[in-house]
Amino acid sequence: MRFGGWTFEQNARYVSTNTLLNLDALRQGFEPYSLGGRKLMDSIADFESAVNALTSMKFAAPQYFIIAGSRPYQGAAISVDRGGKRLPTTPPVQYLQQARNKWYLVQTNDDLLMPSKDLRRKSCKDTIEAVGQQAISVESILRIMQTWPVFNQYTAYTWVASPTLGTHLLRLHNDTLLGFSVYSSRSFLRLRHHR
């Protein structure tokens, strides 16, 4: 997260997934997302420029990027193909849109314009709608993300961030919660263990 600027999150995209092709793409000089994302975080301050840069970079593997800006309705889900190619079935960038009352996006590990391969997308959408736009907060999103089937045995961690508020929460699968706030004069770290 770039405080006051934008957030960057990556999800695996299981379209033409092939480890050998990904390794070959790395050998050819295509970007691993972690290094490419880090470069952008260091050099780009605003949401629009970040979206443009991510859509034009040539990454070594197919994936999704979820970007949030610091102003209202700055949010996008980007589907990326290996090597900067654009497959015919790859969805265009999906944006939040105030005019169409599209106030949230749910990106799981499948393309947004295709039917979902599991229950997570529908469940998450239903829960967000039930909470409602006025009650959405970092904490309510964390609760939604920690509810089955969105949270399941394959969840390694959940990260919720707000570049506007300058806060983020990270919950590991074993229920450890790490939270940081730049609003206070000091950061805080809270750990909980349930077993």
Image (tube, grey):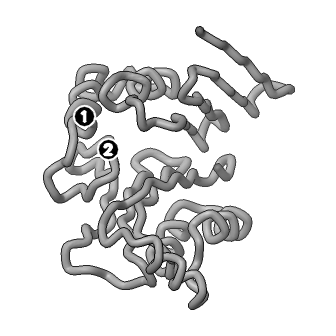
- Location of residue 142 in the rendering, given as x and y in whole percent from the top left corner: 48, 26
Q: Residue furthest bottom?
A: 28
Q: In the image, what residue type sits under mark 1?
A: Lys
In the picture, measured across the screen, residue 89 lies left or right of residue 181, that is left
Toward the left, the furthest residue is: 115
Q: Element type at marker 1?
A: helix
- What residue appears at the point 33 percent right and 51 percent down from the top-left corner? 109
Q: Would residue 143 be found to the left or right of residue 190 on screen?
A: left
Residue at the far front in the pictured view = 20
**Residue nearer the viewer, 89 or 185:** 89
Q: Amino acid at mark 2?
A: Val
Neighbour tally class for label 1: few under 14, some 14-19, many 20 plus, Cα within 10 Å? some
**Mark 2 lies on residue:** 106
| In the image, residue 10 above or below residue 156 | below
- Marks 2 and 1, the one that precedes in the sequence: 2
Q: Which residue is mark 1?
A: 125
Q: Is residue 159 left or right of residue 153?
A: right
Crowd rating for badge 2 (residues with CA inside 10 Å; few <14, some 14–19, many 20+):
some
Q: Does residue 30 sit above or below 153 in this rendering?
A: below
What x and y, as percent, mark residue 148? 33, 24
Instruction: Tell me which corner region of the image, top left, top right, bottom left or bottom right, holds residue 14.
Output: bottom left
Q: Position of residue 22 (x, y in %)?
A: 48, 76
Q: Position of residue 49 (x, y in %)?
A: 54, 70
> SS for tag 2?
loop
Q: Which residue is rendered at x = 40% and y = 69% of the image? A: 62
